[in-house]
Image (cartoon, rainbow, N blue to C red):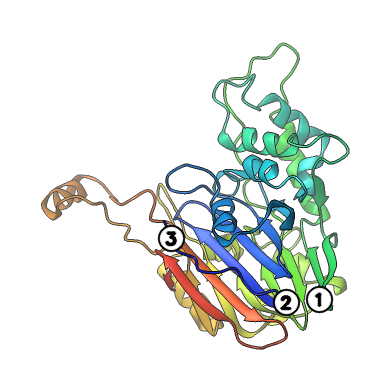
Amino acid sequence: MTNYGSAPAGDEIEVMLFGPGLGEAIAVHLGEGQWLLVDSCEEKSGKGPVTGHYLDALGVNPEQVLAILSTHWHNDHIRGLSVLANKYPEASLFISGALRSTEAMSVLSAYNGKTAARQAKGTSEIYGFLTSRKKPHRAKIAAAQSSLVDKVLNRCNVKVYALSPLQEAYHKAIAHMAQFMAADGESINNAPPEPSPNATAVVLHIDVGDDAILLGADLEDNKTWGWSAMVEDPWVLERGQASVYKVAHHGSRTGEANCVWDTLLHKEPVAVVTPFNWGCHRLPTDDDRARIRARASAAFISSDASRSPDIPAGQLKRMNAICKDIRKVDGAMGAVRMRKTLNTKHWTVELFGAARPL
């Protein structure tokens, strides 16, 4: 079991990013023992969400978790969310506002695993997250300019804002969901595909003291619903520039927007990214890595385990002769932890497991 050491001091800010190669979860210490959890992925053993184990290892009590957010419903960001919702019963739950549409709720209800024999894990996990609390304590929405946390900790204002999804993203999400609403008497055999491109992901801006943290989720760039549209809003531009950036969409070019680096971030921030290894998709690419390193003072990836299969070289050579690409589907779990004392400038970075400099 990984030794994570001691919990952050009351006046320390922490961002802990987990990612095994297919999955992402974030724990943020806002100060005075108060925590925010963003998305979820499970331990490699499959024995529950990694952020739950992490907080247990630090000795964090359930009532210290203020809020849990699901940025979007892609499978690699949600495994274990319903467990977290039950583990931390006092925490406020938040989901992307686009999921509160009538169409979305109808689809999730239909594909929750009770009626759909082969439903995707995503629909059942989100359904469990949404229904884990009794009314009126069910999940709240996170939409552009909404406030998730507003507290005074260490005599400083700590504010967590959602910068997305934008209004245009709602229309896109509803159009997607409407395609999969079952008609009366219609049997349900397969789950709806995850929305793509990702327009509904919740970007978080965390103001802590004289600094800020930007968590980019998986939002992609687009002039009507993505990053480029977001930074045109004067309200967004009034947010303090961030010194830490969780790079959007696993470092992919689709999540890249120069306006983010130029307006929402300090010059040369600390950048962290989780990989995405699935099928023919491998992110970040070598070009992505070089691009991120060029914009950041330091850059790290939560898991950079070898993508080569653990088979003898001779067998691998023969298999490569008949197959286009042979590699691991998933890597080892890793985590990047950034800490600093409130109102100081420099972050201390620690790497766990398979985490590496980018």
Relative horizontal placement of residue 226, taking residue 151 as reference (left or right): left
Mark 2 or mark 1, which is nearer the start of the sequence?
A: 2
- Disc 1 or disc 2, which is closer to the eye? 2
Label 3 vs label 2, nearer the camera: 3
Q: Is residue 293 above or below residue 353?
A: below
Residue under the point 63% across and 41% down? 83
Residue lying furthest top: 185
Name the spot of residue 90 as percent of width and height, x first: 78, 48
Q: Label 2 near label 1: C-beta < 8 Å?
A: yes
Q: Residues within 10 Å of mark 2 (few under 14, many from 20)?
A: many
Residue 190 sits above or below residue 219 on the image: above
Q: Which residue is identified by label 2? A: 212
Can you say whether 169 is above or below 262 in the image?
A: above
Tell me the quarter of the image containing the C terminus.
bottom left
Q: Which residue is mark 3?
A: 2
Q: Residue at x 57, y 79 (%)?
A: 270
Of residue 163 and residue 227, the one placed in the foreground of this image is 163
Q: Position of residue 189 (x, y in %)?
A: 58, 20
Label 1: how many Cα within 10 Å (few below 14, some 14–19, many 20+): some
Gap between marks 3 and 1, in whole Å?
36 Å
Q: What label sits on residue 239 in the rendered view?
A: 1
Q: Amino acid at mark 2?
A: Ala
Quadrant where the N terminus is found in the figure: bottom left
Q: Which of disc 2 and disc 3 is earlier in sequence? A: 3
The one of 287 and 207 positioned closer to us in this rendering: 207
Give the Cα distance between marks 3 and 2: 29 Å
- Picture coordinates of residue 157, whole percent (x, y): 84, 75
Residue type at the position of mark 3:
Thr
Say whether residue 112 is visible: yes
Label 2 element class: strand
**Type of amino acid at the residue the image marks with label 1:** Arg
